[in-house]
Image: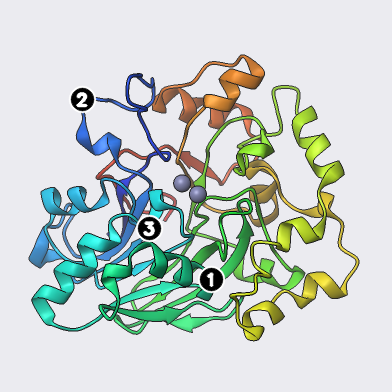
């Protein structure tokens, strides 16, 4: 069995269960189901490892409930945190983690993010001033993860609405001799800002952990959907693409607060004739272009499906079945709707 696994610290949408309501997908009585999407790539010999059995833990996003998950299940500080974007449902736990580390080791805690995401996070948590060692993610640029051996990553910018400045998906390449794994976490996303040359790094993913906010498109939510509508031709999406411009998709990245180096990373889109309809606005479209081995659907809401398509909000088992039955993907691709605390072992290997 591989020593590398992805542990689900939380799988939820911004507020998995809105106060005063119930949600068919999330169990209000199960505190673990109240956590936002958060994951750890961990290295361990053991199936469900506890504190000392974990060799290392790289945590991707840390929203509501992620710290409570850590406290209850392994009570161990991750080696580093990686942020996909600055929204609070992906960053809230940073305060607790950073302060824990600083109290224990009296040194700054490593946090990986783009410069724009970092500036936003810094202003959200002024009390952490001096307690964080910022590790910059430069768009499209491969970098080493300093805290462990054999792990590299590539941040690929995404569009997730105007407020998600500096938002990126993060591709991890793990190769420590015995373990070779390629895992992509999309974070929240309406479309990835992929250049032609980026596809080579995305082929043969062992695992794609993907924002599956709704089954059908409602681009105003700033999240993409699993498919393009019950009839495969959503008017909401067609209208959005009609009005969408490259300028709109780049706006959250070309901010004044960004360095010139950061802004330069987007010249590809400014110097070429690129059509917005060539971008991926659904998971189905993205998957077809990269053929991942496993796809974990997370961050599910279903609210827009219900509101704009009169389609039911599903349970986790129903969502998994629906994805398997309705998404046309290469048959080597497996859909998983993971539960919290699940350790995903790359089932096709
Ligand atoms: Zn979110
Ligand atoms: Zn978000």
Measuring 35% from the left and 52% from the top, which residue is drawn there? 38
Q: Nearer the viewer, mark 2 or mark 1?
A: 1
Q: Tell me the distance, in whole angstroms, between the alpha carbons under discs 2 and 3.
A: 24 Å
Q: Hey, which residue is sitting farthest right in the picture?
A: 273
Crowd class of label 2 (few under 14; some 14 to 19; many from 20; radius 10 Å): few
Earlier sequence position, callout 2 versus callout 1? 2
Element under disc 2: loop
Per the image, the residue denoted by label 1 is 116
Q: Which quadrant of the figure contains the N terminus?
A: bottom left
Q: Tell whether 318 sits left or right of 291.
A: left
Relative to 7, is 42 above or below? below
Per the image, the residue denoted by label 3 is 61
Question: Is residue 2 at least partly visible in the picture?
Answer: no
Which quadrant of the structure image shows residue 15? top left
Element under disc 3: loop
Per the image, the residue denoted by label 2 is 29
Please give the count of numbered marks on the rendered protein: 3
Q: Tell whether 92 sits left or right of 256.
A: left
């Amino acid at each position: 069995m591989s020593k590398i696994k992805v542990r689900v610290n939380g799988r939820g949408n911004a507020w998995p269960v809105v106060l005063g309501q119930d949600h068919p997908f999330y169990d209000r009585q199960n505190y673990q189901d109240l956590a936002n999407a958060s994951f750890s790539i961990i290295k361990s010999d053991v199936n469900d490892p506890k504190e000392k059995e974990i060799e290392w833990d790289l945590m991707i996003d840390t929203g509501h409930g992620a710290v409570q998950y850590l406290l209850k299940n392994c009570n161990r500080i991750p080696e580093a945190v990686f942020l996909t974007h600055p929204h609070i449902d992906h960053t809230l736990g940073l305060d607790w983690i950073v302060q824990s580390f600083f109290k224990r080791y009296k040194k700054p805690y490593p946090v990986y993010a783009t410069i724009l995401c970092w500036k936003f996070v810094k202003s959200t948590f002024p009390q952490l001033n001096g307690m964080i060692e910022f590790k910059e993610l430069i768009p499209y640029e491969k970098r080493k993860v300093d805290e462990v051996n054999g792990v590299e990553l590539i941040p690929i910018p995404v569009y997730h609405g105007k407020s998600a400045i500096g938002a990126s998906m993060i591709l991890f390449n793990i190769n420590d001799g015995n373990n070779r794994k390629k895992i992509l976490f999309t974070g929240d996303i309406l479309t990835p800002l992929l250049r032609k040359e980026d596809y080579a790094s995305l082929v043969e993913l062992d695992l794609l952990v993907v924002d599956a906010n709704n089954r059908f498109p409602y681009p105003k939510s700033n999240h993409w959907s699993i498919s393009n509508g019950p009839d495969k031709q959503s008017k909401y999406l067609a209208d959005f693409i009609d009005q969408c411009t490259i300028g709109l998709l780049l706006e959250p990245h070309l901010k004044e607060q960004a360095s010139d180096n950061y802004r330069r990373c987007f010249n590809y889109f400014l110097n070429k004739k690129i059509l917005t309809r060539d971008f991926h606005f659904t998971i189905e479209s993205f998957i077809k272009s990269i053929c991942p081995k496993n796809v974990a659907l997370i961050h599910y809401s279903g609210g827009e499906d219900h509101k704009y398509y009169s389609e039911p909000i599903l349970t986790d088992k129903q969502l998994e079945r629906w994805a398997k039955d309705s998404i046309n993907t290469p048959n080597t691709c497996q859909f998983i709707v993971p539960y919290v605390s699940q350790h995903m072992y790359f089932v096709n290997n």
